[in-house]
Amino acid sequence: MKQLRLVIIEDEPATARNLAFMLQSIDESVQIMAILTGVDDSVNWFLLNNNNYDLIFMDIRLADGLSFDIFKRVSLSKPVIFVTAYNNYAIQAFKNNGIDYILKPFDQQEVEQALNKFKNLLGSALSDAGAINLSQLMEQLNEASKSYKKSFLVHFRDKLIPVETAKIAWFYTANELVYAQTDDARQYVIDFTMEQLEKQLDPAAFFRANRQFIINRKQITEVDFYFNGRLSVKIKPVPPENIIISKARVPEFKVWMNN
């Protein structure tokens, strides 16, 4: 049986041990090549072992910096599954060899799904010699990432009609319902939660502004400074209340708007 060589980058020893145990329980071919705890020791290990692994499970906030700093100091040639307690690095993660993004606390099912995703993407990306063809793997990943929801089937006057996702200006939740407002000012009830929508919408086009709003970049007309380091987003059509970006989410919002 061909071994699946994994590297874990995690600065919490108990979490690293738990992840390693789960991975080896899921697949007996898993070999843990290294458990690294920070940016510096990761860079040093990869400089010596840059081809001696198949996949990385990587935390984002490490004791000596963000794991994205590793990519600035050494060229990593293999895919990464990010494992983190923070949900605001997804866009940056997928720009750094990321093929999946697991939020802590995680369970074995989530880890197994991520590992299976890697294996499925691997498929034909194996060369005749058994080595990973990374460019082909990333091409497959890019194709998979295009499978975001293109339209929603909604109820309208006793009918079901399709509404193109690109024409939705914002999603809004109130009174346990989720509404989609289109760019021509029509509003529909959507049979999804905001959390489900986040997973189905293209993160390059839509942003979870706060608990009540997911907004479409193309419909933003202006961004104003607000109290206490927050931002106020103006969007069309005008929503039922102000869209406020919290101080904690402002950096991620700026990165999103600048991409």
Image: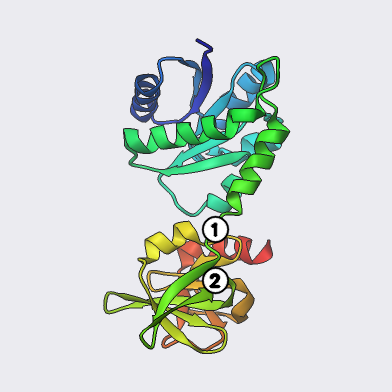
**Amino acid type at mark 2:** Thr
Residue at image location 39% in from the left, 31% down from the top: 12
Residue 165 is marked as 2
- Where residue 206 sits, quadrant-wise, is bottom right
Q: 158 or 72: nearer the eye?
A: 158
Q: Can residue 253 be seen? A: yes
Q: Nearer the viewer, residue 108 or 124?
A: 124
Q: Residues within 10 Å of mark 2 (few under 14, many from 20)?
A: many
Dots 2, 1 in contact, CB < 8 A: yes
x 40%, y 34%: residue: 111
Q: Which mark is residue 94?
A: none
Q: In the rendered view, would you say 235 is above or below 191?
A: below
Task: Return the disc, 2 or 1, that comes first in the chain's sequence.
Answer: 1
Secondary structure of the residue carrying numbered label 1:
loop
Residue under the image location 38 percent in, 61 percent down: 195
Please indicate whether residue 48 sits to the left or right of residue 150 in the image. Answer: right
Q: How far apart, in angstroms, are the residues tagged by discs 2 and 1? A: 9 Å
Above or below, 112 relative to 151: above
Q: Position of residue 221 (x, y in %)?
A: 63, 83
Q: Quadrant of the C terminus?
A: bottom right
Q: Tag 1: residue type? A: Tyr
Q: Position of residue 243 (x, y in %)?
A: 47, 79
Q: Is residue 254 rendered to the left or right of residue 29?
A: right
Label 1 belongs to which residue?
148
Check disc 2 and report its element: helix, strand or loop: helix
> Residue 114, how many percent across, how many down?
45, 36
Q: Check the image and name the residue furthest to the top.
A: 1
Position of residue 40 relative to residue 176, above or below, is: above
